[in-house]
Every structure is written in structure tokens, then in C-alpha cells.
Image: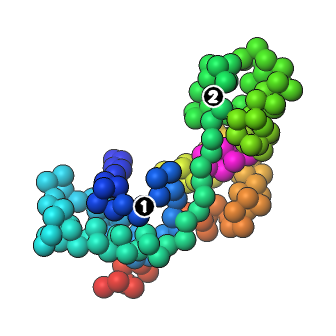
Amino acid sequence: MGYRSIYIDTKAFPNLPKEPATWSCSPLLKCILEEIAQSDWATDWQLPSRGAHWLLVLWDELKLADREEHYLELPKDYRIQKFDLLTYAPPLSELAKHIGASERTITRIFLKETGLNYQSWRQQWRLFRAIELLSEQRSMMDIALTLGFGNDSAFSTFFKNMTGSSPTNYSSVDKSQTEQEYR
């Protein structure tokens, strides 16, 4: 199993948002992203090549796609910086013990520097991390345990409350249907 990222030169597409962004994917956008991600490293991306046309379709689809705001500010306080919150956001009591600050101090820092108290910030982190893990096609139980939920049912309830969609519906792609729609 491999992993490839798609990096878009913002000079070529100046209207893209400057901050990290997540878009809802139409079936066409998913197909184009798969084509680009699986293309040969030596693909010609300049017009009039096929690769350049894929990029033009990608650009059109991104302009039309609904954006989902998935950006989470990290606090800059030196005490919080000791802990890698991108990898793991523990319960408040555990974070307090690890960095040697009171729960109240941590809550104040998060509120001041992110606009969210720690509990709200952690819930957003769990949602964003869940979306990332869903894209890796990991099992619901594995995701639930990774994010500190007792079981996959608790995780599914959390996810549906946060997004309005079940984790399965949020991440599912019926490839055969998608391929048939665009042949």
C-alpha cells in the first residue's frame, strides 16, 4: 500500500485559499484526484498534455466544491509546545500532568490563543483526526480507540453529532458507480 500527496502550486492557481482547506468531493473530483495521485512521476503537467487538462478539471471542480472549514489553531505558549498535540490530544487532566500546569491555566491559555477552551479544541482535533484516519480506510474500532473513545458506537455518535453524517457515509466512495457515471 502506498501513499501520495498532491501539492498544488498556488502561483498557478492564485485563487486557492492561503490557509489549509478541505473540500467536499464530487464523484468527478474524486476521480480526477485519483488520476493525478496515481500518475507517473514524469507526467507532463504543461498544456496541451493530458495531465494539464486534468489540472484544469481539478481547478474547475475545486472552484465549485463546497469548502469545509477544518483549521485548528495551535497554542504558542511554551508549556503547551512541550507536548505534540498534532499527534495526540489527551484528556485535560493528562495534559496538565504532562506539562506541569493546572487544568485552569491550560484552559485559559487555549481560550486566549485559539478562541476555544481545551475541551472544545480537543473535540475539534478529534474530528479532524477522525477525518484523516477515515481517509486511510482504517476500521471504525481502530479509529475509536486511537481517538480515546470506548467503542466504535461512541465514536460514530460523536462523528454524526459533529458533521451530521455517519463516518461510513462521510468517507464512502462507491468506485464502480463513480466510474460508470464518468465513462
> What SS does tag 2 mark?
loop
Q: How far apart are the two marked residues, 1 and 2, measured between alpha carbons?
A: 26 Å
The residue type indicated by label 2 comes to: Lys
Image label count: 2
What is the image's colouring? rainbow
Q: Residues within 10 Å of mark 2 (few under 14, many from 20)?
A: few
Q: Nearer the viewer, residue 98 or 140?
A: 98
> What SS does tag 1 mark?
loop
Q: Nearer the viewer, residue 120 or 40?
A: 120
Q: Residues within 10 Å of mark 1 (few under 14, many from 20)?
A: some
Q: Is residue 143 above or below residue 165?
A: above
> Could you tell whether 27 is left or right of 92 in the image?
left
* Residue 10 location, quadrant: bottom left
The disc, 1 or 2, on the residue closer to the chain's N-terminal end is 1
Q: Nearer the viewer, residue 164 or 180?
A: 164
Q: Is residue 13 above or below residue 147?
A: below
Quadrant holding the C terminus: bottom left
* Residue 8 location, quadrant: bottom left
**Residue that appears at 64% across and 19% down:** 78
The residue type indicated by label 1 comes to: Leu
Tag on residue 60?
Answer: none
> Could you tell whether 8 is left or right of 41 in the image?
right
Q: x, y (%) of residue 178?
A: 41, 78
Query: Residue lying farthest right?
Result: 104
Q: Does the rendering let one see residue 29? A: yes
Name the residue beneath numbered marker 1: 16
Span highlighted in magenta in the image: 123-130
**Residue that appears at 23% across and 73% down:** 53
Q: x, y (%) of residue 175?
A: 42, 73
